[in-house]
Image (cartoon, rainbow, N blue to C red):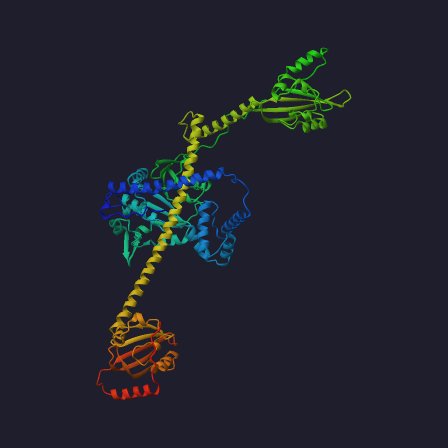
């Protein structure tokens, strides 16, 4: 499933390849440069404006205040119905769409729902259940089968000149060459591979040595591929010598040669869940991976890695790259998306060093029964950690120097209730911890409490609250110590970061076979940012490629409909010209009336006879026309013909032509009927001027005159 640039080769742009057997599509430098410039314009310059807009919109969404908030009920309902629809298709049809990119999948499903006139994924699931035939239409919409022979000349030229010769060097003359074309759609790409190999080996050697497997998930596309029949439009880009050599022309259709067709084996294969074809030397999967999300692409590439022989080649589309899977495939030509299988990556090893235990602070200062109280107080005051003591009434009792410096407390604060001091709730709510220590009768610790000091520096403390009891076991106060673990926390964070960097560097060293020995942190961070940016650009490029193929598919449908409308319009024009010529060629004046007796046709002899142009009488009531003919005398026969009572009527009436001369007009009335409709659709009136002295003229004149006397005509002006 891939998109073409749509550039048609001029006749002089085809030349003969270097293979000795027959010509193959190859392009001169001048055409290649034009083609390359157009490719760069289509794939780089034009999408960059959309890429820039998309990335800026994505950044704005990430920075938006509503980004990350809970979804609305409508969106939750839509996502739930979509998940149920995908689960239904998976369980009933075996179609697993969970690995497809969500944006493209929703766009294709919405297009199909608009086609059948259904709104909502839940309603569409009910529609599929009620109409089993809808599954084929849905599958045709989801799988965009857009492909062509020898698509994108640069990769095929590289495949012909570089890859095929290397493949033939690796495989000895008697060995079988196995080729897999994954996502072959209607077969153009598979047959293109067959032609390239046949040109390199010769047709007979190709039939003896090559096994070409072509797979897809669309059974209808596979049926067309097995037939191998294509129109002139499908082969417009293929040089005539290739068409003549490898195709049979019958009934405006080109059929791939049967003897080579037997070497191409078509079959259904789901790249996500079915087992891959093994022991493959060349694997072509062009513009198929771009429809899947990242994890699904990784699984498919792992299957491709298993399928390829050592040294096998992977041929991808121009919108696809596998830079993040360098452990499995090595690029041979990144521009043309040609890769070779790497050695199987080594299994991941355990970390080199265990994660260290965070350092802990010193234990709170313990008192002693020294006889020198002053010494005890001085020792407490110069303690290495901020510490204070409260008495049994919850008042500040002791306070050392570090506590005064760190929390801006003063000696004057001694004796004040703890709840009145800022230290009671900042950096941590201490009153609840003190109550817990009293209740549990043991020290209570709060680890890693962050606090930004008055100097603005971020610090971390382990807070230890130790209850104090008198000799009788009654609560006598509590000691609160703040053990500064900032340095340990920073070292731990640095150690964790270093451990992650070391593990990442070790994995990279393994994947590149220990070719690189050291990587610094700044370079590694830069590589990760570039890879992230490349993935975003690649994803956006794949989306643009998908939209381009959808537009091309829609354009082809519109062209087909336009061609049908043009043919119908030509047929109607021919028919109108034929009828106009027929009415003009008849010498009788003809008036064709509809069921309302309004004039629809008024030919040229009628204009010459009565002096009234067709534009003046069309759509007017016939019986009210002022044309010199007593129309009231044929009113009843006209109505009888319209009602189907008579098959015709003929009368000779006295009339006056456009020159003012009295004439006898032979007037004949016929019903206007069709072959299948018994009810007349209108009336045809023939008016002929009889020449003077016509035999029997007197009789007709007398009859006409008698009719005129019995029912005199009332001349009425023509009205529109």
- Residue 123 at what x, y percent from top left? 51, 55
Residue 18 visible, this angle: no
Q: In the rendered image, which quarter is residue 626 located in?
A: bottom left
Extreme-right residue of the structure:
472
Q: Residue at x 48, y 38 (%)?
A: 62
List x then y, in percent, for residue 326. Answer: 41, 34
- Residue 47, compared with residue 383, is above or below; it is below
Closer to us: 13 or 596: 596
Locate residue 663: give its quadrant: bottom left
> In x, y percent, where is residue 682?
36, 75
Is 104 situated left or right of 688 in this image?
right
Query: From what the image shows, is residue 26 above or below residue 406?
Result: below
Locate residue 118 relative to residue 475 in the image: left or right: left
Instruction: Give above or below for 206 relative to 587.
Output: above
Residue 17 drawn at (x, y percent): 24, 43
Q: Quadrant of the C terminus?
A: bottom left
User: As rendered, which of 14 and 557 lies closer to the eye?
Assistant: 557
Residue 239: in sight, yes or no? yes
């Amino acid at each position: 499933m891939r998109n073409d640039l749509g550039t048609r080769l001029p006749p002089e742009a085809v030349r003969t390849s270097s293979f000795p057997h027959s010509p193959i599509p190859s392009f001169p430098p001048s055409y290649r440069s034009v083609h390359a410039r157009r490719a760069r314009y289509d794939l780089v310059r034009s999408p960059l404006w959309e890429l820039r807009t998309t990335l800026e919109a994505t950044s704005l969404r990430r920075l938006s205040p509503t980004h990350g908030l809970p979804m609305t009920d409508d969106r939750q309902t839509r996502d739930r119905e979509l998940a149920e629809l995908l689960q239904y298709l998976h369980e009933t049809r075996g179609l697993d769409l969970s690995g497809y990119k969500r944006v493209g999948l929703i766009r294709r499903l919405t297009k199909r729902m608009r086609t059948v006139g259904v709104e909502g994924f839940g309603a569409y699931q009910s529609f599929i259940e009620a109409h089993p035939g809808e599954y084929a239409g849905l599958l045709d919409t989801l799988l965009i089968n857009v492909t062509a022979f020898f698509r994108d000349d640069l990769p095929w030229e590289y495949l012909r000149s570089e890859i095929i010769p290397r493949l033939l060097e690796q495989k000895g003359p008697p060995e079988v060459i196995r080729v897999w074309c994954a996502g072959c759609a209607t077969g153009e790409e598979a047959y293109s591979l067959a032609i390239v190999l046949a040109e390199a080996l010769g047709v007979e050697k190709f039939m003896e040595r090559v096994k070409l497997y072509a797979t897809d998930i669309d059974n209808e596309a596979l049926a067309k591929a097995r037939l191998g029949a294509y129109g002139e439009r499908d082969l417009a880009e293929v040089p005539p010598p290739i068409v003549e050599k490898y195709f049979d022309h019958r009934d405006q259709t080109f059929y791939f040669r049967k003897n080579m067709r037997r070497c191409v084996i078509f079959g259904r294969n789901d790249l996500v869940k079915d087992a891959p074809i093994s022991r493959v030397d060349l694997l072509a999967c062009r513009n198929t991976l771009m429809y899947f999300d990242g994890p699904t692409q990784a699984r498919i590439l792992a299957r491709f890695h298993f399928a390829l022989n050592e040294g096998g080649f992977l041929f991808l589309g121009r919108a696809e790259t596998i830079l993040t899977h360098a452990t499995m495939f090595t690029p041979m030509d990144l521009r043309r998306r040609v890769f070779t299988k790497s050695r199987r990556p080594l299994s991941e090893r355990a970390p080199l060093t265990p994660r260290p235990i965070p350092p802990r602070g010193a234990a709170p200062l313990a008192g002693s029964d020294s006889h020198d109280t002053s010494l005890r107080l001085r020792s407490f005051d110069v303690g290495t950690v901020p510490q204070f003591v409260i008495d049994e009434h919850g008042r500040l009792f002791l306070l050392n120097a570090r506590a005064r410096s760190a929390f801006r407390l003063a000696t004057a604060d001694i004796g004040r209730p703890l709840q009145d001091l800022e230290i009671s709730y900042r950096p941590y709510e201490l009153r609840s911890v003190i109550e817990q220590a009293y209740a549990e009768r043991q020290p209570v610790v709060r680890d890693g409490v962050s606090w930004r000091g008055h100097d603005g520096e971020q610090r971390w403390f382990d807070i230890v609250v130790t209850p104090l009891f008198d000799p009788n076991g009654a609560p006598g106060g509590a000691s609160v110590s703040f053990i500064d673990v900032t340095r340990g926390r920073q070292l731990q964070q640095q150690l964790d970061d270093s451990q992650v960097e070391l593990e990442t560097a070790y994995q990279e060293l393994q994947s590149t076979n220990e070719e690189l020995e050291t990587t610094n942190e700044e370079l590694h961070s830069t590589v990760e940012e570039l890879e992230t940016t490349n993935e975003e650009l690649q994803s956006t490029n794949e989306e643009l490629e998908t939209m381009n193929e959808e537009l091309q598919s829609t354009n082809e449908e519109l062209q087909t409909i336009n061609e049908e409308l043009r043919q119908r319009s030509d047929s109607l024009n021919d028919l109108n010209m034929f009828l106009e010529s027929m009415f003009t060629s008849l010498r009788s004046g003809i008036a064709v009336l509809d069921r309302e007796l309004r004039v629809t046709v008024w030919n040229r002899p009628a204009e010459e006879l009565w002096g009234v142009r067709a534009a003046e009488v069309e759509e007017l009531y016939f019986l009210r026309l002022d044309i010199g003919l007593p129309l009231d005398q044929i009113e009843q026969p006209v109505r009888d013909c319209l009602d189907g009572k008579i098959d015709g009527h003929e009368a000779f009436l006295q009339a006056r032509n456009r020159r003012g001369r009295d004439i006898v007009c032979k007037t004949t009335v016929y019903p206007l009927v069709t072959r299948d409709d018994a009810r007349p659709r209108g009336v045809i009136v023939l008016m002929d001027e009889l020449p003077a002295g016509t035999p029997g003229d007197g009789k007709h004149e007398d009859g006409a005159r008698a009719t005129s006397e019995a029912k005199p005509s009332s001349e009425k002006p023509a009205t529109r």
